[in-house]
Image: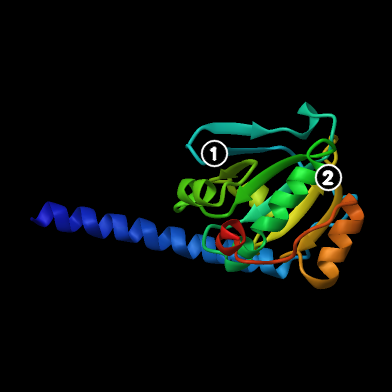
Amino acid sequence: MATLLVCSLGINLLLARRVVSLKLLVGTMKSEAQLAAGDKVAGITARDAQGNIAVLDYRSTSVPTVLFVISPTCGWCTKNIMNMRALTEQAGDRYRFVGLSLSSDKLGEYVAKNKLPFTVYADLPYAPLRDYKLGGTPQTIVVSPNGEIIKVWSGAFAGNLQKDVEAFFDVNLPGVMDPEKALNE
């Protein structure tokens, strides 16, 4: 019994340390400005929704990469799903679309339920979180094949943000909505 108590205490201390570390990271990222056009970023090593390790390398494609930064618990990310689908459908021949989730908790379920038409990666190491200045969701980042930031949007595609995204990609988007209601209509 004492052994279990010691193990439990050890695990709780490790988890508490991890929570403090993540809070410091989020605080640091919130205080920094977001990426800007012209900034350079490196590729990312992360896990897909099935747990497979992959390297997201921008030089492996001749088209720009659109990163959808999401989280399964983000309500605005869910409301933006129809926009992400429409953008992927309308501009998929001109861009590569990838999801980056800031949380792996229930990610596989979230991807399957929402029928996301692109691969979603999670379990990002600290360096990309810091270098990409990731902290809030949803966020959309366009990266050139040489790793240069082309455009960054923070928030769901509504109002002026929706108009800006539509103009940039030359597409028409449905706007924010509940994806379950939209699929059932």
Q: Residues within 10 Å of mark 2 (few under 14, many from 20)?
A: some
Q: Along the line of sight, which residue is nearer the eye, 4 or 180?
A: 180
Name the residue at 74% across, 51% down: 86
The quarter of the image holding the C terminus is bottom right
58 vs 50, nearest the viewer: 50
Q: Pinpoint residue 71: horizontal percent, then vertical percent.
A: 57, 58
Left/right of residue 182 with respect to residue 147 in the rendered view: left
Q: State how far apart marks 2 and 1 are (Cα).
A: 22 Å
Q: Report if residue 66 is visible in the image.
A: no
Find residue 184 and report its horizontal and vertical position in percent. 56, 59
Report the label total.
2
**Disc 2 marks which amino acid?**
Lys
Mark 2 vs 1, N-terminal side: 2
Going 86% across and 52% down the picture, which residue do you hit? 171
Secondary element at tag 2: loop
Do the numbered discs 2 and 1 sit on residues whose CB atoms are within 8 Å?
no
Image quadrant in which the N terminus is located: bottom left
Question: Which residue does the image show at 65% across and 41% down from the upper left?
Answer: 118
Residue displayed at 44% across by 52% down: 106
Indicate left or right for 75 with 160 as reference: left
**Three-letter amino acid code at disc 1?**
Arg
Label 2 vs label 1, nearer the camera:
1
Task: Mark 1: give few (<14), some (14-19) or many (20+) Cα within 10 Å.
Answer: many
Q: Which residue is mark 1?
A: 47
Residue 94 versus residue 76 in the image, above or below = above
Res 40 label: 2
